[in-house]
Image: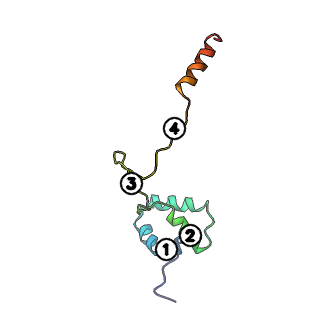
Amino acid sequence: MNENAKPSSGYKFIDEAPEEYAQVWESLNEGHKQSLIAQSAFYNLETPYQIKNFWSTRQLGRNIGLQKLVENENIETNETPATPIGYSNDYLRSIAEALEGKF
C-alpha cells in the first residue's frame, strides 16, 4: 500500500481538486465544506476540466481577476462621446400641444 497516498474523501471533486484549491479546502470550516458538497450535486464533475471549472467558479477568497470600481475616478478615453438619442424639445412641445385637447 502506498503510504504517501491521500485518504479519499469520498468525493471525486475534492480528491481531484487542483493543488491550489486543496489548500483552500483544508482551510474551510465545516459549514463551508458542506455548502460546497451540496453545490457539487448540481454539476457533472467527472473530468479534470469540469472539476477545475467548478473550483474556479466558487469564489473562495481568491483574487478572481475583477477590477475594483472606483466611482470618483475619471477615466480618459480617446473615444468621441456618443450623441444622445432622444427627442428634441420642439417635437415634445408639438406632442404636448396635440394632446392638450384630448384629455
Looking at the image, which residue sits at the far bottom?
A: 1
Please give the residue where the numbered disc 1 appears in the rendered image: 18
Q: Are marks 1 and 3 in contact (CB under 8 Å)?
A: no
Q: Nearer the viewer, mark 1 or mark 3?
A: 3
Disc 2 secondary structure class = helix
Left or right: 24, with 35 as reference point: left
* Mark pair 2, 4: CA separation: 46 Å
Please give the residue where the numbered disc 2 appears in the rendered image: 51
The colour scheme used here is rainbow
Image quadrant assignment for residue 67: bottom left
The C terminus: image quadrant? top right
Q: Are marks 2 and 3 in contact (CB under 8 Å)?
A: no
* Residue drawn 41% across the image and 52% down it: 77
Q: Residues within 10 Å of mark 3 (few under 14, many from 20)?
A: few
Q: Nearer the viewer, mark 4 or mark 1?
A: 4
The percent coordinates of residue 32 (x first, y second) are 46, 59
Res. 77 visible in picture: yes
Amino acid found under the numbered disc labelled 1:
Pro
Please give the residue where the numbered disc 3 appears in the rendered image: 68
Instruction: Depth check: give the residue in front, 36 or 70.
Output: 70
Q: Are marks 4 and 3 in contact (CB under 8 Å)?
A: no
